[in-house]
Image (cartoon, helix red, strand yellow):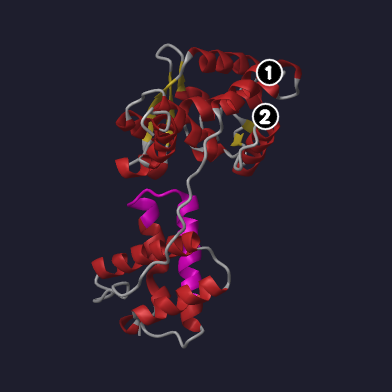
Amino acid sequence: MTTFNGHIEAFIDYLLKNKRMSLHTCEAYLHDLKQFDVSLNSIGNPPLDKLSSLHIRNWISNLMEEGISARSVNRKLSSLRSYLRYLRSHGYLNHDPMTKVVSPKTPKHLVKDIPLADLKSMFDRFPWNETENGQRDQLMLLLLYTTGMRLSELIYIKRSDIDFDRKELRVLGKRNKVRALPMHDELAEALKRYFVLSGGMYVFERKPGVPFYPVFVYRLVNHYLRLFSHASKTSPHVLRHSFATHMLNNGANLIAIKDLLGHSSLSATQVYTKNSFEKLKKIHALHPRK
């Protein structure tokens, strides 16, 4: 009798080697699938060929009762859906238990960008050169805001990824896709100054050959943005969001922004048009016939 968890390890190995997903993503998939397996064990651990939408809907109900957000539940369902698709494609499962499963609705949440004036004030007014690790911190913030890169991409930038002659840097994005990002003069000069002070394989290292933890960078970014902005969210991702929104507001092409952000589809980038549309509505309110 084949049970649900019989092929999980092979599936995770498939994601790592064939889909080239990051270790972090695969660990999240593994956690979600093990969590569903625990749910199945609590109701008798039905064999794989008896798995139905009722089992999945029961799991969703339990998660929601535990206070898990709809967004998190949907992420877990995505992991489960991928695993079941893998089982069907390899002949381990001959039906789709997800057919009658309805994902919980997620509330629409529009992430606000950091106001341009706040960022200008932070970069121009803070005494970076007079503060311990100030040049390093300023460089981290500049990289995030002027390129739109992800936090996970920032911490793994190597010195060899920087090309000053071409004024570009390379980052390793999702699914191990490499993309080149342009550097403007301020960023290039900040990198050159920082390289005089530090050396190593990675641009940012907590010790030789070891990059910073994501949590460290998150706290650092949050600290500086809190000093100069009253925005509700102040994280590395909000800087990425601000990069895209401010570029769009200044007339940048949406497809070009998609490529800079490393999005696989335009639909992921279109969220930034919502912020810009709010600004357009305010401008339109000035029309004399309003």
- Asked if residue 185 lies in the magenta stretch, the reply is no
Query: What is the count of numbered marks?
Result: 2
Q: Mark 1 or mark 2, which has the lower sequence index?
A: 1
Q: Is residue 132 left or right of residue 104?
A: right
| Of residues 99 and 216, the one drawn nearer to the viewer in this rendering | 99
Please say whether residue 248 is visible from this viewpoint: yes
Residue found at x 43% / y 37%: 278
Give the magenta-colored segment's residue range.
Answer: 15-37
**Disc 2 residue type (three-letter):** Phe
Question: Where residue 116 sits in the image (x, y, percent)?
Answer: 54, 26
Please say whether residue 207 is visible from this viewpoint: no
Q: Quadrant of residue 202?
A: top right
Residue found at x 49% / y 70%: 34
Q: Secondary structure at mark 2?
A: helix
Question: Where residue 273 sits in the image (x, y, percent)?
Answer: 38, 37
Q: Is residue 26 above or below residue 136?
A: below
Disc assigned to residue 228: 2
Question: Where residue 84 sits in the image (x, y, percent)?
Answer: 33, 69
Q: Secondary structure at mark 1?
A: helix
Could you tell me if the residues under marks 1 and 2 are in contact, i.e. CB atoms within 8 Å?
yes
Residue found at x 35% / y 65%: 81
| Of residues 186 and 6, the one drawn nearer to the viewer in this rendering | 186
Disc assigned to residue 180: none
| Of residues 153 and 111, the one drawn nearer to the viewer in this rendering | 111
Question: Where residue 241 sits in the image (x, y, percent)?
Answer: 48, 36
Q: Residues within 10 Å of mark 2 (few under 14, many from 20)?
A: some
| Of residues 158 and 153, the one drawn nearer to the viewer in this rendering | 153
Q: Residues within 10 Å of mark 1 (few under 14, many from 20)?
A: few
Residue on which the image places disc 1: 125
Q: Is residue 87 left or right of residue 35?
A: left
Quadrant where the N terminus sits is bottom left
**Disc 1 residue type (three-letter):** Arg
